[in-house]
Image (spheres, grey):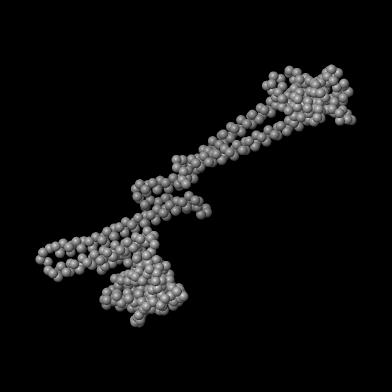
């Protein structure tokens, strides 16, 4: 489903920016929390180390005291605590009940707080870490409370508290957060700009395709093409294939439209001629004093042109239905091609005048199809051969099948692929010694209204659709048709291949014996 309203370039840039933003956010969060854990762990290790040193130093002194705040002489411990005092480091001694025995000498405002959790930890003989405010509450410290045991026993005789200011830690983490946010925002902005430019460059062929398509839609100029540069490495990317496919599609559309224009022009021309003749004859019949013989000739000519126009309309309707993909209305019955070809040849001999028409069969050729349409196909080929063969020439019609190889030498052609019949195909060949077909015209002989000889007219009844209809009928029966010729004035050969009926499904069609005229090889 296409999403309208936002360009593809904008969507790609937004997706790229969102993905990069999530990546930067995840990386920054991981870095921030990893650094936070590392600094916190280092601070706790420093507190533990200092607490152990303080316990070893003041533990024996506290054990010899009465373990009551009023029995402790602060002067005896101040000198010891002073050795552990540093800027931002505070130490404090507690009794087993949590009473302060000695306060930090460097703490402005008195003593370190002793939260209930610390008193509970002393009673339970375990260390504890807490973050507590000191002084006026503007600064926080990391406080470690660790019990002191009497030498030789596990009796708790007091506790030591070591605290470190959290201000440097908090300042460091705030600076890291600002740095990550600033660097991430700049990186994201730079990536979005670069991504926009790269996406614009990468989608430039799409823009050219769109511009070309709009130009063609607005002007109808199907001769315009995209300039496609072959890739230097590999086989090309998706946009290269898209542009190449677009050019192929436009070329195909140009060919189709040109064919439609030519078909419309040729159809108009072919219909205009009989209509003009019919109107002229009707005007002649309206005159007075026209001899009766002239009137009869005008009526016959008008009837012939009307019949020709009817055949043309019928042929166009048949091809139009084929182009529309409508189901074929062909009959499916057993047809003996030899019988049908014989009928066509016998009917064509009077029209052939002095041209020699021969007919030869090899084996039985029974196919499943429409007898009338197959007869129309054969008649179109024979009439085409008669029309383009001089009176001194000859036409040879040969049909073979049932695994019999078709005689005759192979003819070089772009459309002929050989003359050997397979065991399941019937081969019908119509060869003439007429004007032939040039190599340039050979690929187009089955196009509608196409004439290899532009100087010849269709005054003898041809509509220019005979070969097109023959091709349609052959393909509708599951077969094919090819044209072959060695060039101008060297004759032509039309070969039709149709599938034979399987032996187990053939019905013996009614047929009459046909005399076979000896076939004289035609030099090609």
* Residue 5: x %, y % from top left: 45, 40
Number of numbered discs overlaid on the protein picture: 0
Above-or-below relation of 246 to 31: below
Q: Residue at x 29, y 76 (%)?
A: 349
Relative depth, front residue between 455 and 50: 50
Above-or-below relation of 70 to 400: above
Q: Residue at x 34, y 77 (%)?
A: 342
Above-or-below relation of 308 to 152: below
Camera sees residue 4: yes
In-image side of 135 versus 521 (left or right): right
Camera sees residue 484: no
Q: Could you say which quadrant of the image residue 256 lies in?
A: bottom left
Relative depth, front residue between 374 and 238: 374
* Residue 461: x %, y % from top left: 26, 67
Relative depth, front residue between 274 and 459: 274
* Residue 151: x %, y % from top left: 88, 29
Q: Residue at x 56, y 40 (%)?
A: 19
* Residue 273: x %, y % from top left: 23, 62
Above-or-below relation of 389 to 67: below
Q: Quadrant of the C terminus?
A: bottom left
Relative depth, front residue between 14 and 234: 14
Q: Residue at x 80, y 26 (%)?
A: 160
């Amino acid at each position: 489903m296409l999403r309208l309203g936002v360009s593809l370039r904008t969507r790609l840039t937004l997706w790229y920016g969102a993905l990069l933003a999530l990546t930067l956010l995840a990386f920054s969060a991981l870095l921030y929390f990893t650094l936070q854990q590392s600094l916190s762990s280092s601070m706790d290790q420093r507190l533990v180390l200092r607490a152990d040193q303080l316990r070893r130093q003041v533990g024996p002194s506290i054990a010899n005291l009465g373990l009551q705040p009023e029995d402790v002489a602060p002067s005896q411990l101040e000198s010891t605590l002073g050795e552990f005092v540093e800027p931002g480091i505070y130490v404090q001694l507690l009794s087993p009940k949590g009473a302060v025995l000695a306060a930090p000498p460097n703490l402005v405002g008195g003593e370190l707080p002793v939260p209930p959790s610390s008193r509970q930890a002393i009673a339970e003989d375990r260390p504890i870490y807490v973050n507590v405010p000191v002084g006026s509450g503007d600064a926080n410290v990391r406080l470690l409370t660790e019990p002191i045991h009497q030498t030789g026993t596990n009796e708790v005789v007091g506790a030591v508290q070591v605290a470190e200011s959290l201000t440097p830690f908090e300042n460091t983490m705030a600076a890291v957060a600002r740095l990550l946010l600033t660097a991430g925002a700049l990186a994201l902005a730079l990536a979005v700009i670069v991504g926009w430019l790269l996406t614009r460059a990468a989608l430039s062929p799409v823009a050219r395709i769109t511009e070309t398509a709009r130009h063609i839609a607005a002007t109808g100029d199907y001769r315009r093409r995209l300039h496609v540069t072959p890739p230097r490495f590999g086989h090309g990317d998706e946009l290269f294939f898209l542009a190449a496919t677009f050019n192929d599609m436009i070329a195909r559309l140009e060919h189709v439209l040109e064919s439609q224009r030519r078909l419309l022009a040729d159809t108009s021309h072919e219909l205009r001629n009989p209509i003009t003749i019919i109107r002229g004859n009707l005007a002649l019949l309206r005159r007075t004093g026209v001899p009766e013989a002239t009137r009869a000739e005008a009526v016959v000519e008008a009837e012939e042109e009307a019949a020709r126009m009817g055949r043309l309309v019928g042929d166009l309707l048949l091809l139009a239905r084929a182009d529309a993909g409508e189901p074929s209305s062909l009959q499916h019955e057993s047809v003996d091609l030899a019988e049908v070809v014989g009928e066509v040849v016998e009917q064509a001999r009077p029209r052939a005048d002095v041209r020699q028409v021969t007919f030869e069969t090899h084996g039985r050729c029974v196919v499943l199809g429409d007898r009338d349409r197959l007869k129309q196909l054969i008649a179109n080929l024979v009439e085409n051969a008669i029309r383009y063969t001089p009176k001194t020439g000859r036409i040879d019609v040969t049909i073979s099948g049932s695994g019999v190889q078709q005689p005759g030498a192979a003819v070089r052609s772009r459309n002929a692929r050989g003359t050997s019949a397979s065991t399941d195909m019937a081969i019908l060949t119509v060869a003439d010694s007429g004007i032939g077909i040039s190599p340039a015209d050979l690929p187009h002989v089955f196009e509608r209204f196409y004439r290899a000889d532009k100087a010849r007219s269709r005054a003898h009844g041809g509509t220019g659709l005979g070969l097109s209809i023959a091709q349609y009928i052959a393909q509708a029966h599951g077969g094919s048709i090819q044209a072959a010729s060695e060039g101008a004035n060297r004759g032509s050969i039309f070969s039709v291949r149709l599938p034979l009926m399987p032996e187990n499904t053939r019905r013996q069609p009614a047929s009459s014996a046909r005399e076979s005229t000896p076939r004289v090889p035609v030099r090609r």
